[in-house]
Amino acid sequence: MSTLLILALLLSAPPTRTTRPIPRREFLRRVIQVTDATREVPVTVSAGNATTLAFPQPINGARVVLADAHGYFGGRPVDLNGNFLMLKPAKDIPSGEAVAMQVTLVDGTALPPILLSSLKGSTDLFVDIAIAFKTKASADSASGLKTQVGELQSRLDECEQSAGDKGAMKVAELVLRQDFAKPAAFVVEKHSARELDKQSHLLVETRDVYRLFDTSYLVVSLENRDPDKLWVLERAEVSVVGGGSTVGARVLDVAQEMSQGIPPGEEAKLVVAFKTPEQTSKHSFELKLFEKAGNRHITLSDLNL
């Protein structure tokens, strides 16, 4: 065969395709022991695949809170059947993120948060949860409340960041509505407003007040010194006192570090936003914080804001 013919055959041959191997996902069956020292229970899930958690006791009637703010599980509730809890996400959880799930068993035992995440190479198909508590944490106990409130709250950071972006947009809209010809169009100030008091097993301190245009923002720290009870804010009231009268200021919002409540032994900040009322040097402010479903209310008087 001539050299020219061999060359023509080589050129006319179809190109060789390199087939990349499809990465295989490993489905795992694991046992996770939960003890008093366990801070969190990591479980891997993947889109379209069911993950089953097996518990040593029936969990029908257990309380399950899935902090799925981004809808990775498609809004579908978890499935409880006998001793089993089943999950099936609609899409993978992005790398570096996790969805927290809090499980409180029927007997009141609050488990450490179960952190659900996705890995490219593996998925937990079946996880046997072996509970080995020396002291069970009741949902109504201080440690149980701290687990439920503190851990789940910490998993909402991304939602809070997006809320901050929306807040910046609101401020921009507020600036846009100002009459720039008036001197008060750019009123921005901050000054100390420190007052400390103890009331109803609570240590409360006003710290600083910020003013932006016609709105005031009062920063308050609150420490819950009750050993057993969660403290949850229902509402805040602000009044101007002086000249023989008391006039209420319109409270716009209360931003809280722990919106689900302050566990025993914990301290958190809150910011009370209210419309700045007209006042003179003879006036003072009064702040009231009302406890939800309780009577541990707080009243701070003679505040210089």
Image: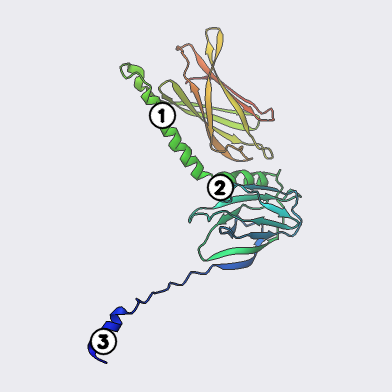
Q: Which residue is mark 1?
A: 171
Q: Amino acid at mark 3?
A: Leu
Give whichever of discs 1 and 2 has the lower sequence position: 2
Residue 127: assigned label? none
In the rendered view of the protein, which quadrant contains the N terminus?
bottom left
Q: Residue drawn 61% across and 43% down? A: 149
Give whichever of discs 2 and 3 has the lower sequence position: 3
Which type of secondary structure does the marked residue at label 1 adopt? helix
Is disc 3 surrounded by few (<14), some (14 to 19) or many (20+) residues within 10 Å? few
Q: Residue drawn 50% across and 63% down? A: 120
Q: Residue drawn 52% across and 69% down? A: 24
Q: Is residue 177 visible?
A: yes
Colouring method of the image: rainbow
Instruction: Work out whether 86 lies above or below 140.
Output: below
Tell me whether circle 1 and circle 3 mark residues in contact (CB < 8 Å). Answer: no
Q: Which residue is mark 2?
A: 71
User: Can you give x and y, in whole percent of width and height, for residue 69 in the image?
Assistant: 55, 45
Q: Amino acid at mark 1?
A: Val
Give whichever of discs 1 and 3 has the lower sequence position: 3
Q: Residue drawn 38% across and 29% down? A: 172
Q: How many marks?
A: 3
Give the side of residue 108 with respect to residue 37, left or right.
right
Q: CA distance from mark 2 to mark 3?
A: 63 Å
Q: Quadrant of residue 135?
A: bottom right
Q: CA distance from mark 1 to mark 2?
A: 29 Å
Q: Which residue is mark 3?
A: 5
Instruction: Out of 68 and 277, give the one closest to the viewer.
Output: 68
